[in-house]
Amino acid sequence: ESSEMIVETLKMYEDAGEEWLKSDATVDKTLRNTLQLYRAITFASFFCKSHSMVVYFSSKAVQLSLSRGICEHTPLSLLQFTSVAIKDDNAMMCYRIAKNALSLRERFDLATQIPELYMNFYGRVAWRFEPFQAGVHKLRQCLDAGLSSGRSDIGLFCGL
């Protein structure tokens, strides 16, 4: 069930601790390719309104990163997960995970992922904790970045 996967993934993240974020980046190509596949399936499932598939693949992506290491696709995996996992009872933990995911931008070249990162963080998580105007400004940047990078789907979604 979806809620059980969310609880299991949150527990795995908590058990891994903040030190996990500081670990060396992995060069595991299988991990990178699998996370890219899971990201695409999660994104498509979201628009097909299949909540259970979104939860399944976003949870699996995070679990895979927790067990195999961090790569350039880990931040987006974490943000996709928190955007579907966040509820009133776990909102602070999801916000912390999402902030940690954004902090990984400094370690990897994520320029092509900025529209999706911002959409998931500012559009789905941060609005609960940060000033609304700051989020609107970032979503505007997301719109511009999405349109200029060829990701008009993400850009327009941020513009809504």
Image (cartoon, rainbow, N blue to C red):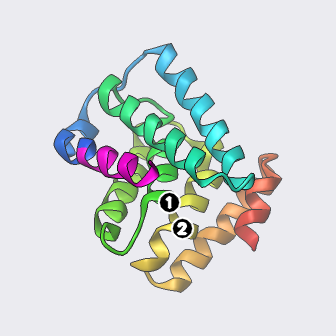
Badge 1 density bin: few <14, some 14–19, many ≥20, Cα 10 Å: many
* Position of residue 43 measured from the top left corner of the image (x, y, whole percent): 66, 46
Tag 1 secondary structure: helix
* Position of residue 104 measured from the top left corner of the image (x, y, whole percent): 39, 44
The amino acid on which the numbered mark 2 sits, given as a three-letter code, is: Arg
The amino acid on which the numbered mark 1 sits, given as a three-letter code, is: Ser
* Closer to us: 140 or 65: 65
When the figure is inspected, residue 42 is found, relative to residue 72, above or below; the finding is: below
Q: Mark 2 highlights which residue?
A: 124
Q: Mark 1 highlights which residue?
A: 83
* Closer to us: 125 or 115: 125
User: What quarter of the picture does the C terminus occupy?
Assistant: bottom right
Q: Is residue 89 left or right of residue 19?
A: right
- Using the rendered view, name the quadrant where residue 107 is placed: top left
The residue sitting at 41% across, 39% down in the picture is: 62
Residue 49, magenta (yes or no): no
- Using the rendered view, name the quadrant where residue 40 is placed: top right
Specify the segment rendered in magenta: 1-11
Residue 8, magenta (yes or no): yes
Q: Is residue 61 left or right of residue 118?
A: left
Tag 2 secondary structure: helix
The residue sitting at 77% across, 47% down in the picture is: 149
